[in-house]
C-alpha cells in the first residue's frame, strides 16, 4: 500500500516550489561573486528576493536591505534581513514538501512548541565578531576568499567553543572555515558548492543574532519507554562521524508511539574508515549491541529536545527483546506521531522521514518502480561501515529507508532491506556491524589492514607520556 502512497507523492512538486528556489539561487549567485561587485542581474536578484515578501511583515525591511546593499552600503543588519528572507523561502518550500509527504503517508505531526526561554549568556562581543566575519565573506564573495580571511575567524571559534550554550555555532563556524580553507584558492575552482556554502552562511548569520534564536536545541522533558530501532543513518566527515538512529518510542506512560532520533557523535581522523568507525563509539556498548543484535531498548529519563531528538545516555538504557526493523515498521510506522520541526531545521534537504516500502520492482537504473512512478534510490548514502551494498538493494523485495528531498526530487535512502542471499530471504541493515563485521572476507581484510584506531591510540599515548 505504501508504494502506491509514495507514487502519489512523486506526481509533481507543490505549487511555487520552483519559483521560490529560483529566488534563492539568485541570492546564492550574488554570494559567489560578492556583494561589493553586484552586476545588474544580481542586483535584480536581490530585489526579486525582497519582492517576494512585499505583502508580509518583513517586506519593508527586506526591500530596504536589498536597496542598501545594491547601493554599496552593506551593514550587518541588512545581511541579517536578507539571510532571514532566504531562510523563510526555504522554510516555506520545506513546509509544503513535508505537508505533502505527511499527507501521502497519512502521518500525523506534532505542532511546534518552543522550549522555555533560557537566560542569555554574555557572548555579545563574540557574536559581534562572528557577524563581522560573515559580513566580510558576503562582501568578498566565495571567489575572493583567501587564507587570511578564513583565518580571521579562528580566535572567535576558540572563544565560542569555551562559552556555555554556543558550541552549536562554534562547530558550524569551525567546519565552514575548514571547508573554505581546504578549497583555497577558491578563485581557481571550477565548481563551487554554491548552495551548501550559502546554507552554512545563512545558518551562521541567524545563529549569531543576540537572543533571536536559541543557540542550542533545548530539552522539553524526560521520556522513558521502549525504543524500537528502524535503522541507522551514518553521517561521516573527515574529522567526525555521527551514528543517527531512527526509531519508534513507545512511552512508558502509555502515550502514543512517536518517531524519534537519537545517536552519538565521535571525533575521528580521515584515515579511520569502514567498519573501524564503529570502534570509535565503544563507550556506547548498549546502543551498539542493540543495533548489531537487533534488540529493543528499555530507556529511562532520556532528555527529549525540541527537535524531536533524544539525548543518548548509555547508562540509562538496557537491552530488551529481539525487534527487527521490518516488524517495527509494519506495526508502528503508520500510527506513530512525527516530531515537529524547529525553525532553523526547516530546510528541504534536511527532510528524512522513515518509511517501509514493499511491492516495488527494481528498474535497470536501480530505481524503485512503485507502480507507475519511480523513486531514485540514493545508494551514494550507503555507509562504508555496514554490510548494505548497492547489489543487495538492487536485489531487495522490501526496504526500510528515509524519504529525502534533494536536488529538486524525492529520493529513498535505504537503511535496511530484505533480499535473497543463497536462495534464503535475509534482512541486512546499516547497523549490523556495530560490534564488528560478520562477513569473513571483511574480517580478513580488516585483520590484514590492522587496527587503525588501536595504532593511533597507542601513538597518542606515547606522545602524552613524553
Image (tube, rainbow, N blue to C red):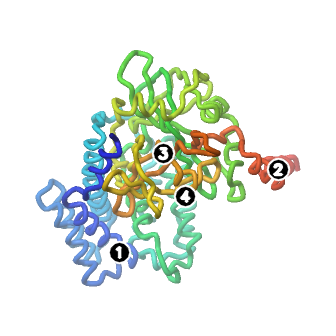
Q: Residues within 10 Å of mark 2 (few under 14, many from 20)?
A: few
Q: Give how far across and how far down residue 27 sits, in percent.
A: 31, 70
CA–CA distance in space, label 1 to label 4: 23 Å
CA–CA distance in space, label 2 to label 3: 33 Å
Q: Earlier in the sequence, mark 1 or mark 3?
A: 1
Which residue does the numbered mark 3 point to in the structure image? Answer: 397
CA–CA distance in space, label 2 to label 4: 35 Å
Which element carries disc 1, helix, strand or loop? helix
- Nearest the eye: 350 or 9: 9
Mark 2 and mark 4 in contact? Answer it, CB < 8 Å: no
Q: Residues within 10 Å of mark 1 (few under 14, many from 20)?
A: some
CA–CA distance in space, label 3 to label 4: 43 Å
Q: Earlier in the sequence, mark 2 or mark 1?
A: 1
Mark 1 and mark 3 in contact? Answer it, CB < 8 Å: no
Residue lying furthest left: 55
Q: In the image, 382: left or right of 124?
A: right
Which residue does the numbered mark 1 point to in the structure image? Answer: 29
- Mark 1 vs mark 4: give the one in front: 1
* Residue beneath the point at 36% across and 20% down: 255
Q: Residues within 10 Å of mark 4 (few under 14, many from 20)?
A: some
* Residue beneath the point at 41% across and 25% down: 221
Q: Is residue 416 visible?
A: no
Q: Earlier in the sequence, mark 1 or mark 4?
A: 1
CA–CA distance in space, label 1 to label 3: 43 Å
Residue lying furthest top: 253
Q: Give how far across and how far down residue 135 sits, in percent.
A: 39, 67
CA–CA distance in space, label 2 to label 1: 48 Å
Which residue does the numbered mark 4 point to in the structure image? Answer: 174
Quadrant of the image containing the N terminus: top left
Mark 1 and mark 4 in contact? Answer it, CB < 8 Å: no
In the image, residue 120 sits, relative to residue 81, either above or below, namely above
Q: Earlier in the sequence, mark 3 or mark 4?
A: 4
Amino acid at each position: 500500500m505504501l508504494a502506491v502512497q509514495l507514487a502519489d507523492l512523486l506526481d509533481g512538486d507543490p505549487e511555487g516550489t520552483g519559483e521560490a528556489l529560483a529566488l534563492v539561487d539568485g541570492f546564492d549567485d550574488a554570494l559567489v561573486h560578492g556583494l561589493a561587485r553586484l552586476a545588474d542581474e544580481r542586483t535584480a536578484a536581490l530585489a526579486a528576493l525582497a519582492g517576494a515578501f512585499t505583502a508580509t511583515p518583513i517586506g519593508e525591511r527586506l526591500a530596504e536591505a536589498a536597496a542598501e546593499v545594491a547601493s554599496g552600503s552593506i551593514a550587518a543588519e541588512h545581511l541579517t534581513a536578507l539571510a532571514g528572507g532566504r531562510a523563510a523561502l526555504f522554510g516555506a518550500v520545506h513546509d509544503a514538501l513535508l505537508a505533502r509527504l505527511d499527507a501521502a503517508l497519512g502521518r500525523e505531526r506534532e505542532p511546534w512548541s518552543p522550549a522555555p526561554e533560557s537566560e542569555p549568556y554574555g557572548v555579545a562581543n563574540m557574536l559581534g565578531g562572528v557577524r563581522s566575519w560573515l559580513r566580510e565573506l558576503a562582501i568578498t564573495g566565495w571567489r575572493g576568499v583567501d587564507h587570511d580571511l578564513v583565518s580571521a575567524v579562528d580566535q572567535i571559534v576558540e572563544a565560542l567553543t569555551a562559552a556555555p550554550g554556543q558550541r552549536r555555532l562554534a562547530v558550524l563556524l569551525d567546519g565552514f572555515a575548514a571547508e573554505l580553507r581546504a578549497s583555497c584558492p577558491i578563485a581557481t575552482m571550477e565548481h563551487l558548492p554554491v548552495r551548501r556554502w550559502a546554507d552554512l552562511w545563512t545558518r551562521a548569520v541567524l545563529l549569531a543574532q543576540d537572543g533571536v534564536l536559541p543557540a542550542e536545541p533545548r530539552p522539553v522533558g524526560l521520556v522513558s519507554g521502549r525504543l524500537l530501532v528502524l535503522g541507522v543513518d551514518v553521517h561521516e566527515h573527515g574529522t567526525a562521524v555521527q551514528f543517527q538512529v531512527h526509531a519508534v518510542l513507545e512511552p512508558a506512560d502509555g502515550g502514543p508511539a512517536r518517531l524519534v532520533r537519537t545517536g552519538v557523535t565521535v571525533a575521528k581522523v580521515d584515515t579511520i574508515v569502514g567498519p573501524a568507525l564503529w570502534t570509535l563509539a565503544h563507550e556506547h556498548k548498549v546502543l551498539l549491541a542493540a543495533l548489531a543484535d537487533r534488540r529493543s531498548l528499555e530507556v529511562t529519563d532520556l532528555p527529549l529536545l525540541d527537535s524531536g531528538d533524544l539525548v543518548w545516555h548509555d547508562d540509562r538504557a538496557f537491552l530488551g527483546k529481539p525487534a527487527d526493523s521490518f516488524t517495527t515498521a509494519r506495526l508502528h510506522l503508520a500510527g506513530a506521531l512525527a516530531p515537529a520541526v524547529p525553525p532553523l531545521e526547516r530546510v528541504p534537504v534536511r527532510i528524512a522521514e522513515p518509511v517501509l516500502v514493499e511491492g516495488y520492482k527494481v528498474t535497470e537504473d536501480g530505481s524503485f518502480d512503485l507502480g507507475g512512478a519511480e523513486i531514485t534510490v540514493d545508494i551514494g548514502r550507503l555507509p562504508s561501515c555496514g554490510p548494505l551494498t548497492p547489489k543487495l538493494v538492487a536485489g531487495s523485495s522490501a526496504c526500510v529507508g528515509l524519504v529525502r528531498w534533494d536536488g529538486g526530487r524525492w529520493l529513498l535512502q535505504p537503511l535496511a532491506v530484505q533480499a535473497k542471499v543463497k536462495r534464503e530471504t535475509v534482512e541486512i541493515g546499516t547497523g549490523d556491524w556495530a560490534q564488528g563485521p560478520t562477513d569473513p572476507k571483511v574480517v580478513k581484510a580488516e585483520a590484514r589492514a590492522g587496527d587503525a584506531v588501536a595504532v593511533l591510540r597507542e601513538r597518542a599515548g606515547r606522545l602524552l607520556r613524553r
